[in-house]
Amino acid sequence: MRIVYAEDDAVVRANVAMLLVKFGVDVHEARDGGEALALCRAFHPKVVVLDLQMPNIDGFETARRIRELEGMERPRLIALTGQSSAQAQQEAELAGFDEFLAKPVSGRRLLQAMGLAQ
């Protein structure tokens, strides 16, 4: 499975990407929303995992822009964030996210959200 994972914290990004690679996931990493959009255009991922608080283009706006991309199958959008408020969850739903996960999240739960585990 090919995914795009956007996270501005390099340590968190590396740890999550390493976990996903262990499960055979083809991970394309981005440091912000702009890079995530470029990777989505280039690789047409099945899943996009986005942090909500990123520099330049935040996860909410990135999700909205991904939903507007033409010429690619609609990817599953997962918010993976330190924000756990009801307001953040509601805003994520309005932005087009399919799933909302608050950090820290277990690897199993992330894989479930991606459709890779039960």
Image (cartoon, rainbow, N blue to C red):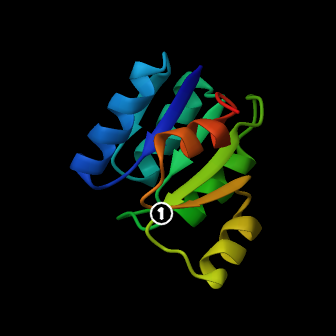
- Residue under the image location 62 percent in, 50 percent down: 78
Quick check: 108 left or right of 57?
Answer: right
Name the one closer to the observer, 32 or 103: 103
- Residue under the image location 22 percent in, 48 percent down: 11
Pointer 1 residue: 81
Quick check: 58 left or right of 87?
Answer: left
How far across and how far down the image is residue 1, in percent?
59, 19
* Secondary structure type for disc 1: strand
In the image, residue 34 above or below residue 100: above
- Residue under the image location 54 percent in, 39 percent down: 108
How far across and how far down the image is residue 10, in percent?
23, 48
Name the one closer to the observer, 9 or 84: 84
- Residue under the image location 63 percent in, 55 percent down: 63
In the image, residue 58 above or below residue 67: below
Rendered image quadrant of residue 89: bottom right
Name the one closer to the observer, 108 or 43: 108
Name the one closer to the observer, 35 or 22: 22
How far across and how far down the image is residue 6, in percent?
43, 47
Q: How many marks?
A: 1
Image quarter hosting the C terminus: top right
Q: Residue furthest left?
A: 11
Quick check: 25 left or right of 1?
Answer: left
How far across and how far down the image is residue 54, in percent?
39, 63
Quick check: 41 left or right of 81?
Answer: right
- The crowding category of the residue bearing disc 1, from other C-alpha atoms within 10 Å (few below 14, some 14 to 19, many at least 20), is many
In the image, residue 20 above or below residue 80: above
Rendered image quadrant of residue 62: bottom right
In the image, residue 20 above or below residue 52: above
